[in-house]
Amino acid sequence: MESLNLIDSLFVFMLAAVVGYHVIHKVPPLLHTPLMSATNAISAIAVVGALLVTGANGSKPATILGAIAVAAAVTNVVGGFLITDRILKMFNKKKAK
Amino acid sequence: MSTQAFIQLVYLGAAALFIFGLKAMSSPRTARRGMLMAAAAMVSAIGGTLLDPHVVNYEWIAVGIVVGTILGGWIAIATPMTHMPQRTALSHAFGALAASLVGIAHYYDHATTVTLVERVALGLEVVLGSLTVTGSLLAFAKLQGWVRGTPVAYPGQNAVSLVLAVVILVLAGWFITDPTATWAFYGMAALAFVFGITLVMPIGAADMPVVIALLNSYAGLAGAATGFALDNNILIVAGALDGASGLILAVLMSKAMNRPLLNVVFGRIEASTAASADDVYAGKVRSTTAEEFALLLEDARRVVIVPGYGMAVSQAQHAVRDLYLALEKRGATVEFAIHPVAGRMPGHMNVLLAEADIPYERMIEMDTINPTFETVDVAIVIGANDVVNSNARASDSPIAGMPILDVDKARMVIVVKRSMSPGFAGIPNPLFAAENTLMYFADAQAGILDVVREVKTL
């Protein structure tokens, strides 16, 4: 990465962190547990890095480490979103009655 | 349009969906839709990445996806709501493991070509990722009861942590400045795994809300660092969102215990110098029975229930719901007072009550309900201790200044508890000896069910 690229990336990081700060602050304590499992699922975006490393036709050890990373990240994607939905469904079913 | 440009556009859309998805979490009504957006963002980010011309080998990817889908699906279906704190800790370990392994694998293949900036990013990624893996696994084991949940103290523990931290930093600096020093990179990674254990070991189970939130933040920052190392914006955005969220929750939680964040991470509550249990309780504790409990509720107009970790341990949320319904049927107003650190993770009590079909409008935050306790006829404390410990108001108390639920201001307080054993803070609770307090010694679930039966015969 060149230093200009780095500065671009820092811009992105800074803006995302500021947006994140404001968005997260509006989440009521009521939903803090589903918020955590949701951000957890979102942080499984590391799967993108894992896919790039695993699919790059690199060395065997790197590919296997990458595949483990894919498995771990996909576990969080699938588990994270499903469980968040399970929790949120519980908060909503009263409305239906 | 080139494939690369298309992929970047997909990432851009995914980033926007992540942000709007989290924004929808500001209300229980919109939250589910928000998560659908976030899931769509994730799927499109994965799909976009698979189009990348650098991705040529799909076999191992397929293996990873299949294993992850089965494992993730099984965890999502099999986890009971009471185990949510453990589940969350475990998933931090998975997320961080992914980030850490990506860093290690990337370095393994490109050690000689990575630039200075990338080495810095890789260092951050691998250190944060690795310590989060072992730290989260240990937090999981403590919450699951596989490892003793009490703080484990040994002489010089902070010194050990400090030395480890310094050695990790030196190794990181070494491999960053000297591209040939690959051994320094692997040494750094290995020690970071050890560091995660020494970091979480001294922290007790009751401080887990803060620790889980912090580990959440670390996992996110490790992801963001991965984005810097791979020059990938979607990783940076999602990682930053996650990092911000974890940090905000950690700060909120430590405020709710009136302890500086660093104090939770590095210290423990000092041994009590306050009055001993015998002085506080001597002859003043009065216990009650299910029958009397129900009689006290007979004419109550306003009842407030304070749930704590004991309710989760005893799986008493459904029994509590029965009590709530029985009292409402008699015309009483029943509300639930939720302390921010009740339970083992942020929002723990809300989830359990929601599981038992208690409407979220009845779950009231501490700051809202505290000024109204004077008008409460009966406050029922179920398996909570430190969050209602009036000792927090005394200046010489180890938990001085911790905001508490002012249940003692209610006309009558009934505490459902198995024994007089102190809470995590290890100090006696003057509330239990107060004139308007009765102790109902019972397992929360069985005890509440007895009371419900009595209430129904009134």
Image (cartoon, rainbow, N blue to C red):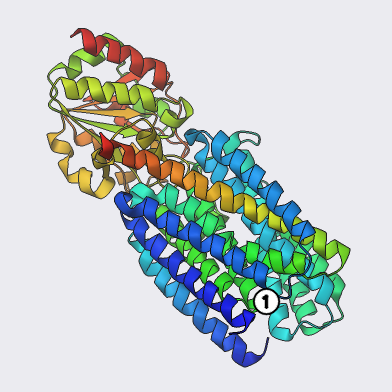
Which residue was labeled with disc 1? B229
Query: Is residue B210 toward the left or the right of residue B93 in the image?
Result: left
Query: Is residue B384 toward the left or the right of residue B264 in the image?
Result: left
Q: Nearer the viewer, residue B454 or B432?
A: B454
For the C terminus of chain B, which image quadrant? top left
State how many labels appear.
Answer: 1
Tell me the chain of label 1.
B
Q: Is residue B389 visible?
A: no
Residue B177 coordinates in the image, percent (x, y): 77, 84
- The answer to which quarter of the image holds residue B120 is bottom right
| Residue in the image at 40% along x and 32% along y | B428
| Residue in the image at 44% along x and 66% along y | B17
Residue B349 coordinates in the image, percent (x, y): 39, 38
For the N terminus of chain B, which image quadrant? bottom right
Query: Which residue of the protein is positioned furthest toward the top in this rendering?
Result: B457
How many other residues sit within 10 Å of disc 1, few (<14), some (14-19) or many (≥20)? many
Query: Which residue of the protein is positioned furthest toward the bottom in this rendering?
Result: A4
Residue B26 coordinates in the image, percent (x, y): 32, 57
Considering only vertical position in the picture, is B385 above or below A50? above
- The answer to which quarter of the image holds residue B53 is bottom right
Which residue type does callout 1 highlight? Ala
Considering only vertical position in the picture, is B39 above or below B317? below
Considering only vertical position in the picture, is B397 above or below B147? below
- Under circle 1, the secondary element is helix
Residue B379 coordinates in the image, percent (x, y): 24, 29
Query: Is residue B373 toward the left or the right of residue B187 in the image?
Result: left
Q: Nearer the viewer, residue B384 or B281?
A: B384
Query: Is residue B70 toward the left or the right of residue B293 in the image?
Result: right
